[in-house]
Every structure is written in C-alpha cells, then in structure tokens.
Amino acid sequence: MSDNYINEPMLEIYLFETTSNIQNLESLVLRSETNSSFTQDSINEIFRILHTIKGSSSMMLYDGISSVAHSIEDLFYYIREKKDVNFEFDVLSELIFNFIDFAKVEIEKIKCGDLVDGDSTHLINDVKDFLNQLIQLNPSKEEVIIPTSNTKQQYYIQQGNKDSTSQEMINTPMNYYKTVITFEDGCEMENIRAYTIVHNLNDITQELFHFPQELFDNEESVTTIRERGFILYIKTDKHYEEMYEIVNKSMFLKELEFTQLEEESEFEWGRGCKTLETPEIKIPEIDNRVEAVVERDTGSVQSIISVNVTKLDKLMDLVGEMVIAEAMVTQNPDLKGLELENFQKASRQLRKITSELQDTVMSIRMIPMANTFNKMQRVVRDMSKKLCKEIKLEILGEETEVDKNIIEHISDPIMHLVRNAIDHGIESSEERVLSNKPKKGTVTLEAKNVGSDVLVMIKDDGRGLNKNKILQKARDHGLIWKKEDEMTDKEIYNLIFLPGFSTKEGVSEYSGRGVGMDVVLKNIDEVGGSASIESIEGVGSTITLKIPLTLAIIEGMNIKVGNARYTLPTTAIKQSFRPKESEIIIDPNGNEMIMVRGQCYPILRLHSHFGVNTKINNLSEGILIMIDQDERSICIFADGLIGHQQVVVKSLPNYIRKTNNVQGLAGCTLLGDGSISLILDIGGLINAS
C-alpha cells in the first residue's frame, strides 16, 4: 500500500463511504425484489454505486473488491445501454448479494487489520458467464462494447454477415467539458477527494487534465483547491446530462460549475495552459454555451457531521464524572445545617446546566432502530429462499431511538429471534393454506418507547408454541423447577430461554442444537433488559424485549442497609411504605409475605441477602419498597430511604464479580458524599426471592 496518499484518515473515510454504499446497494436490491424487476432508475443508481465502490477500492489498492465491483458494473452497463435486455432477475440479484457478502467480509478484515486476501475469481467468472448469456440471448444489430480500463473510448460495432472477416468501427462524436468543483468547508483532504473524482472519471473519458496538476506531492494543492476550486477539462463521448450527473454525485460537493465547450479549440486552449503555475484560467466568452451552477444547501449538508465514536464515549464519561462532581458539591456533608441562600441558587443553576448538558450528550448517542431492523430484510430474504417459505417482513416504529451501546448488544439477539420465528414459527405455504392462513407468512418487527424503556417486539403469524411439547422437552432435560400444574403459560414459554433447550427434532443450518435462546437472554440481561413470550397455538407468537434507553446515567433512589448503600432504578419502584405487624404473613416454609390491597407479595431482606450487619431487623422499624419487572413483584426490606439522585452507572470491580454473592447487583456508583453505592439488579432480586 503506497504511503504517498493512503493514511489512517483516508482509510476511515473509505470504510465509512464504502459501508454506506454497500448498505444502500443491499437495500436497493431488496426493494427491487418486491417487484421482481429493476426499474431504469434502480439500474442507474446501482451502476453509480458500483462505479464508486470500484473507484475508491482501486484507489486504496483493495483489488478484490474493486475487480468484482468492476465486473458487475460492466454487467449493468450492458443492461443500461441495451435497455430492453431480458434477464433472470433472481440470478442477477443473487450475483449482487454474493458481491455484497464478499465485500462485507473483506471490509471486516480491513477493520481488524487482517490481510485482505479474499478470492474473487469465482465471483468474477459467474458475472462474466451471466453477461455472456445475456449477450447470446439478446442478439441485435448493434453490439454494446463494454469499456475497460485499457479502452477509454466507447465503440458501437455494426454486425455484418457472420462470415464477414471485417467489421466497421464507428466512433461516436467527442464532447468537451470544463468543470470547477468546490468542496464543503471543513471536509478536509480536498486533494484526496479531487484524486478520487479523477480516478472515477478515467474509465469514461478519452482525455482528462486538471488544475492543480500535482495532488499529492504538492503541499499547496489543498490550499489551492480550497481557495479557487478544482478545475477539470474533460474529453469524452458521454452526453452532457450523463457527465453532469456523475460529477454531481461526488462526495462533500458544495458547488459545481459544469460547462460544455462548443469547440475543441477551447479544450486545446486549456491544454496549452497546463504548464501554468496558477490554476486560475479564464476562457473567452462564447455564446450559447451550456452552463449549470449548482449551489447546494450547505446549511442542511453541514448540519450533520461524522464523529469518531470513541470521542463520544469519552465525552459521555466526562459528563458522568461531572454529574458525580456536581452531586458531591451540592450534597457535601460539610454544608449540613448551613443556610446559604446564594449557594443554593447557584447550585440549582449548576444542576440545571448539568442536566441539559447530560441530556444533549445522551441524545447525540441515540441511534434509530431503523438500521438494525433493515438488516433483517436480508435475513428474511435468504432464509425464505433456503427454507422454501414465502415470508414478508413488516417494520414498525423504526424511528425509535436507543443508545448506541444498547444497539450493539441487541442486534444479534434480534437477528436470532427473527431466524427462530422463520425456522420454528412460520409454516410452509402448503401447511398455511390447509390452516386457512395466507400463503405468505409475516414476521413483524416493532419498537416503541414506554417511559424510560424501549419495547422491541418480534411477532410472527406462524404455528405458535406447543406447551405440551415444551413441557415434555423440559422433563427430558430435567429443567422443570416447580410443579407443572402450578406453572403459568408464561413460565412454560420462558423455559425455551434455558440453556440446552430446543424443540426442534432435527439439526439444521439455523437451529436444533439447543443454543441461542439462552444467549439471547444473556445479552439482554447484560444491558439491564428482560424478555417475555406470548403465544397462541396455531395463531402465532410474540417475543417482547424490554430494554433501557441508555446504560450510562439513570434516575435512582438511594437506600441504606446498615452501613451499606444501595441504589434502585426509580422506574422499577411501585411504592414504598412502613409495614404493620398485622400485615405480615409467614407461609409453611417460613417465608415472609405481606398483604397489600388483597394480594400477597414475597419479602426479601437485603441485609440477609447480602450479609450486611444492621440494627434494624424488625419489619415495622424499617421500610418496604415494592419493585416489579415483567409483571412479577416483590417487596425488599431496607433500613430507610436516603433520597433521589441521578447516578452514573459503573461496572462492578473484578474482586466483587469474582465472588459468588453478586446475584442482584448490576453495577455501582458514587454518591454525593463520596461513598460508594451498589446498584441493584431488579431481575436478579426477583429471581432470588
């Protein structure tokens, strides 16, 4: 890899832009599959994307990606120029998806710093074979000759008698253009972007020269482009509209002046100025020139910038530390008993600013679920074909936003649940017809906000869960943990989340090994979420993931037990009260329960659970806090409440995590007085009760 122009920032830009182009290409093909055809606009857009990927990959010397993109670009060039080509849509889309999969693997290698050594030979041969079939199946008087990197000029060859030993080559007329490109302010590396444009135009131009000439060796080229623009003179057989469209789609374009020169002499005049040191070239005015100046809405373009995610993580950490520092100042024990009106006024203003800054930083990290949901389109498409099922994917609430770190944890679980719905849930078309269902099954992905949580639902209209079959498998594996007749439907369905559980009789590419659902639950637990299942046999199933909006900062209620401090998420608290002795119930096993509004709730003593010494052992002297999760509630017993506070969630130290007594702990935080508080895990406490 040449060090002359390839460096880390350029690699980062390449990865960002190529990944975006591949995602756009995949979405475009998936949308086209609904109609089993490519529109002319789709063909043009696919051609443009492939041309961009080819050019940028070639510039970065990733020849594998570039070669495959070039071969498919040739294929779409033929289809675009021929216009009335008959082809098998499924085969063509499969070729594109094979390229997408290949490119994704290569890009992951680049990100990991591994050798980019994927073998693209078979992909290129498949594309060439398909192109040859198209040419044979679509004979015409005119043959479109695909331009190659060695053939800058495009020819249309008139077919004569098959026995003829010669063919007449007709050159299309040449057009001459001058373009002045101005890049957006602050886009950086203008010389690299200029080189990319030149590189992309090389294949479709017969001659091209530009100012400044030296884009890499001359340090002043960046300044020159910023001040005067990047000037190009182009000689090509392409029409004005096509060339203008190609240049206009350059990245970070602020202004484009695109002029068609009426005479070759103007082009030659520009060539004569090629040796001038200044790129400020003025061509004499000529009447009736075709000219277009595009002023892009720089306000809308520059309102969005790309920021390295590590910088956002660092900013979030600093805001968290500032929240802690603010609490340590305003809740300093040295201030107890002092009436400081001005201090209180200033502290309220500080708290307001801190809160607004925190909300702003957290909003920056929020990402819509759309990208995660749209990735499932490909999963549904591939599995439908392999399992010979007709399935459509419906997406609802994709605009719902979740913290970036949460997205990273739930992407794989969502994918696994979608695959499970297709493999286990959706029946074959024949079976659905016999059950008076639509021939095509439906998988629905939905996200919506509920308070400080987000609900992600994966629904299917398949066969549903068979309770008897689940119970039988659970018996066989010794997974039944209570009397079967006392188990609710929800508890039975939740058995499928246990390790080693699978109702699939045979092992397939997608399921049957008894792994997956327990990993799903583990990943959801790691972000403080939960999963629940609802199902009606013969109608379908719904798996609901309840996940927090963010992991960084939560609203917490601080409580004390002896000398220890604990923090409860306020969203989990239903109520807190001091119990009366008459309300306490002891069951035959010696477990304590309390009657609240006619319903019994188990009591969990935190000092007993965590082994903390306290002088308050009588329930009537302390306080009970009712918490709930997944429609399960318990009352935890503590000495008393300290107060409400926004807390920054930090992971538990290794020496605590290595102990066995960590069930019910989710993390830790610093309180205003500098003491450490352990953040309680609601799900773990409920399971321990």
Image: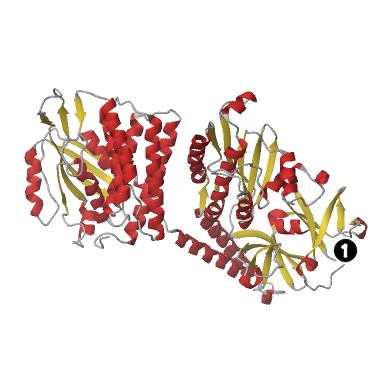
For this view, does 207 lie left or right of residue 76?
A: left
The image's colouring method is secondary structure
Number of numbered labels in the structure image = 1
For this view, does 280 lie left or right of residue 57?
A: left
For this view, does 192 lie left or right of residue 386?
A: left
Q: Residue at x 31, y 42 (%)?
A: 124
Q: Extreme bottom residue here?
A: 334
Q: Which of the 4 image quadrants contains residue 586?
A: bottom right
Whether residue 671 is visible to the viewer of this picture, yes or no, is no
Question: Which quadrant: the N terminus?
Answer: bottom left
Q: Which of the 4 image quadrants contains residue 397?
A: top right
Secondary element under disc 1, as helix, strand or loop, is loop
Question: Which quadrant: the C terminus?
Answer: bottom right
In depth, the one of 2 and 482 nearer the eye is 482
* Residue, disc 1: 620
Where's residue 419, x and y in %?
56, 42
The residue type indicated by label 1 comes to Ser
Q: Residue at x 27, y 47 (%)?
A: 55
Q: Residue at x 17, y 54 (%)?
A: 212
In depth, the one of 563 and 199 nearer the eye is 199
In depth, the one of 64 and 301 nearer the eye is 64
Where's residue 255, x and y in %?
27, 45
In depth, the one of 498 and 373 nearer the eye is 498
Q: Extreme right residue here?
A: 582
Whether residue 85 is visible to the viewer of this picture, yes or no, is yes
Where's residue 658, x and y in %?
65, 70
Q: Residues within 10 Å of mark 1 (few under 14, many from 20)?
A: some
Where's residue 228, x and y in %?
20, 52
